[in-house]
Amino acid sequence: MTRAQANLFLLLAAAIWGGGFVAQSTAMKAIGPFWFIALRFAVATLAVLPFVVFEARKAKARTSARHAKLYILTGLALFSGAATQQVGLQTTTVTNSSFITGLYVVFVPLIAVFFLRRAPHWIIWPGALMAVAGIYLLSGGQLSALTSGDLLTVACAVFWAIQITLAGTAVSATGRPLALSATQFAVTAVCALTIAAAFEPISLSAIWAAAPEILYVGIFSSGLAFVLQVIAQRYTTPSQAAIFLSSEALFGSSLAALLLGETMPATGYAGCALMFIAMLVVELVPELARRRLPAA
């Protein structure tokens, strides 16, 4: 695969994820958030399993009890992120959700500082301030204008950052990203099903009404897009991958405007732009700095 082809794969993955925000929002007209999460990740688990079998045939090491614990913890973080994002979409817009979720790019290095004791690149601090300023502008310059859904989506970005950190550790230890994916999808499905069965009504007609969204997000957003990302990132640079994957927020907001008729004031668009710039600089500046270092 050429680098250009790999970048096109990443762009396609970002577009699929952007469409996923719209599907997540419209599905809740027919089904509760936790039933949607449970069914979505059950479908995703089944979609990834064939790839897991193929991966297992080439695996060099067996999965240990420590690895299994890492997989489960990653799944719990994924469930927490999915739950806060999905519930948040009940009281925030798709545009806000797509951009605020992208703040995980800023939170990942912050987690490395406070929990892993790893000093980040200096750009993290101005990047974090830019992201906070972006949220402020997104609220129209009034923090009271932020909805409970916006705040839940900020929490979602934190859980997403935890999930990414744990996933990176797990994949480094096992070399089996698809096995991790299937496990974390299954853990998320079970957790959501437990809550949904206890607190949310369900019917076959509701499932049928939300089936297109469930299948889209389950098969494409979780299954296909993840596989595209894993394959493509082997053939391109981290900095280029960051640019193409961060376009998820732009696809989410564009599709929300096109399909759902969402709009926002000028300050809101300025806030989105500022958050998008923050996402890019915290990914690109450290990578460019590493490239300029002379070879040892």
Image: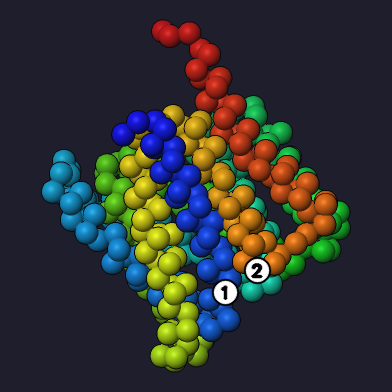
In this figure, which residue is indicated by the disc labeled 2?
260
Q: Is residue 129 above or below residue 224?
A: above
> Tag 2: residue type?
Leu
* Numbered tag placed on residue 109 in the rendering: none
Counting from the top left corner in percent of width and height, residue 135 is at: 74, 51
Is 203 in front, or is 199? 203
Q: Is residue 245 above or below residue 201?
A: above
Counting from the top left corner in percent of width and height, residue 235 is at: 35, 32
Of all residues, the one furthest to the right in this rendering is 142
The label nearer to you, 1 versus 2, is 2
Label 1 neighbour load within 10 Å: few <14, some 14-19, many 20+: some
Q: Are marks 1 and 2 in contact (CB under 8 Å)?
A: yes
* Numbered tag placed on residue 26 in the rendering: 1
Residue shown at the point (31%, 34%) measured from the top left: 1
Please, what secondary structure does the residue beneath circle 1 have?
helix
Mark sitting earlier along the chain (1/2): 1
